[in-house]
Every structure is written in structure tokens, then in C-alpha cells.
Amino acid sequence: MKEILAKNLLILASAGSGKTYQLGNRVIGKIGKEGVEPERIVALTFTRKAAGEFADSVLTKLAKGSLDPREAKSVCKDIGATVDLPAVLEKVIRALPQIQFTTLDGFFSRIVRGFQYELGLTGGTFDLLEGEQLKTAQEKILQGVLRDGFGQRQEFFYAFRKASLGQGQQGVQRSLEEFIETWHGIWKSGSGKNAFGNSRVFVDLPQIEDWFDQKDGLIADLRDESRGKTWEAMLDNFRDHVVGKSLVMNTFGKRLLDVLDEPGPVEVKDGRKMLTISLEVWEIWQQLFRLAIRCELSSAVCKTEAIGELMEQVDREHREQLRKRGLLSFDDVKILLGEWSQSEDARLRRELIDYRLDGRYDHWLLDEFQDTSRAEWHGLEPLIDEAVADPEGSFFVVGDRKQGIFAWR
């Protein structure tokens, strides 16, 4: 184990390996050896239960060490320094109302409550929605979008149909709710409409209908040159393919795709034998594959742009019904704190917050870091950067690669 009090330290640990134990040692060492005031420490995790267990572990360790010399010796050995545990315990107890042993959601919410005007919340006090309250608010947003989001209701459903092209259908309302919940979260995370596609970037994309108009002729030409069952099976897959759904590929089709950019004639393995495909026939295969690929790209661009159009309306309704009335979800709180990366105005407002928080907190501990979302990290990043760079600050991270749910790291 690296020195537990190193200025900036990352620990990769598996479940049950004593991560909470090391977090506690870090806090006790910072207070007892380095003289850090407890209220200048922030320890964040993901659940209230975990935050409570962490606080309990620190207090229990200090209490046992204050009463039992053997416990005190063990704690001091773990920290690598002799520490006056009763004095540390007294400091921690006196500072309990100010100590930030809490969840990410709880910490972000406190910041927003303390700096709501700097974050653009000018409607007075606000409430955080969760559970049934949040579900009811989301239903009202959906109703508002259906009522007012587009000039005419059929335009909305046309955009929704394009956005959900190729997906199986379920109950209309439930389908819309799931759709909006998923994509509005991505929109709010900072992507905005610019990240939802721009068909002008692509030159001469075919219409989706071109697939149905052109595939049959190409397939017929290739059937005339049939070389066996796998050849025919791949052509059947093309015949049955619907744009927006995955093209079923047999082994022969995958081998054709592997050499798609090679000029003909080509040799392709089919079972135990090698097939030589002439230049003329190979060009037809290339046309068929490329038509499918380009129509899929056209479908994806169309779908993504349509999602962007829908989310623009949803976000407008969301702001009208929630933010302006002082109603926020926990996701909104995270997004508000991460808006500094999107505009100069938001960055300047965030600097005012960071300046005051930097003067309050110097030492950061993050548990279960593999579960930190991009939005959560954007909210913390300016504060963490300052702590890492500041000689008087520190950063301690515990994570487990094997349990990670976000690939961006």
C-alpha cells in the first residue's frame, strides 16, 4: 500500500478489500498528523448508507483508539505516524455539523442551494424533486410537449417516428416516456443540439427508400452468378433486411465485408474452399454492400437529427415547467454545476463559486470513483483541479476497474 497520506493518491481496490478502512485512515491522518481542520475535508460517495458507514467507521476507529492502546497502536501503524487519537476525536465531533461526509447528490445540492443566483436560478427558493414528484413533473412535461412542442401534433409524431425508426413498438405513452428520459439526459449533460447530427456534413446520402428501390436488381444479378448455399443465404439476408435494423451476416458475408475495399477479382474462403469472384461480379457485391451501408448511415443521421429536434422542445418545456418555477431534479443539479464548460458566461459564474469553495475545502476524497458519471465529474473538476495543483490541497480516489459502469475513463 502506498503511503496513505500522499498528497494525491489513487487506490485501485476490489470489493471487500478495505477501501472504507483506508478512507478512514486518510481522514484521521490528515487531521491528526497534518493538522487539517475536519471541516476542510470533503469525502463523497454514492449512497447515504455508504456515507453513513464511512462516518461511523471514522468515529468508531477514533473511539476505540482513544480507549484501547492496542487499537491506537494499530491505527497509528496504518497511518504511518503517531497521532493523538482522543484529540482527533474531539475535533471531529465538534466539527460534525460542518464535515462533508456525504453523497455526491447531497454535496451538489448544498452548493446549488448556497449559490443559486450564481447558477442562474433567479426564481427564489427551489425544491428538489424525486420519486413520485419527479415522475408527475415528467408526465406534465410530456403533456406540454405534445400540446405545444410543435406547431401541429402530427409533426411531433412524425419526428418521433423518425427518431425511433427500426425499434419495436410498445405502449405509446410508455415508449415516449422512456425515449425522453434517455435522450433528454444526454442533452442536459452538455451535448446540446450540435451533438445530434448535421446531415449537411454528409454529401449525396441516399434516401432510405433507395434501399427498397435498388436492392432487388442487384440481388437478382448476383443470384445469376450464384456459387452455392452460403452465397444464396447472404443474398436472402440482404433481401429481408430493413433499414434501421442490424443486417444479419453469415460467415461468408463477413469475409466479403473484410475485403470490401479491395479491387476485384477477389478470393474469399467459403467453408473449406476458396472462391474466386470476378471483377464484374465483385463490383455488384460492392454496390450492394455500399448501398446498405449508406442507407444505414442516412437512417442514423435522420434519426439523430430528429432526436435533437425533439429534445430541443423537451428541454424548453422542462425549463418552463421546472427550473423557472424553482423545481429541480438531482440530474438538473449536476448539469447546472457542469455548465461552466459550455459557455464563457457560465464559466465566469462558476469561477465565483469555485473561489469561495476553494477557500472552504482543501482535501477531497472520492469513493467508488468508477461509478462517477461525466456530468458529476464536470461538476467537481474545477475544485479537484485546484486541490491537485495547490500545495496545501490533496486528492484521494478509490475505485475498482472491474465494477466500472462508464467506459469514458
Image (cartoon, helix red, strand yellow):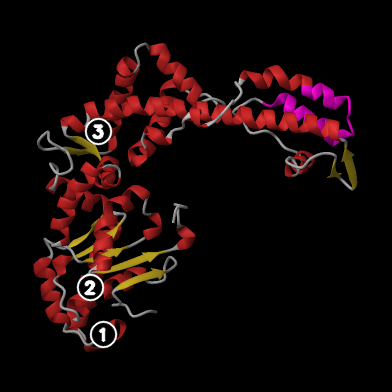
The residue that disc 3 covers is 133
Q: Amino acid at mark 3?
A: Gln
Q: Nearer the viewer, mark 3 or mark 2?
A: 2
The CA span between labels 2 and 1 is 24 Å
User: In the rendered image, which residue does mark 1 sit on?
Assistant: 76
Q: Position of residue 127 (x, y in %)?
A: 17, 38
Residue 80 image offset from top left, x and y in percent: 29, 85
Under tag 3, what secondary structure? helix
Q: Amino acid at mark 1?
A: Cys
Identity of the residue drawn at 36% across and 54% down? 372
Q: Position of residue 35 (x, y in %)?
A: 15, 78
Where is mark 2, residue-wise? 391
Determine whether, in the image, residue 79 is placed left or right of residue 93: right
Q: Is residue 267 left or right of residue 158?
A: right
Q: Secondary structure at mark 2?
A: loop
In this rendering, the label closer to the viewer, 2 or 1: 2
Determine whether 200 is above or below 156 in the image: below
Magenta residues?
218-241
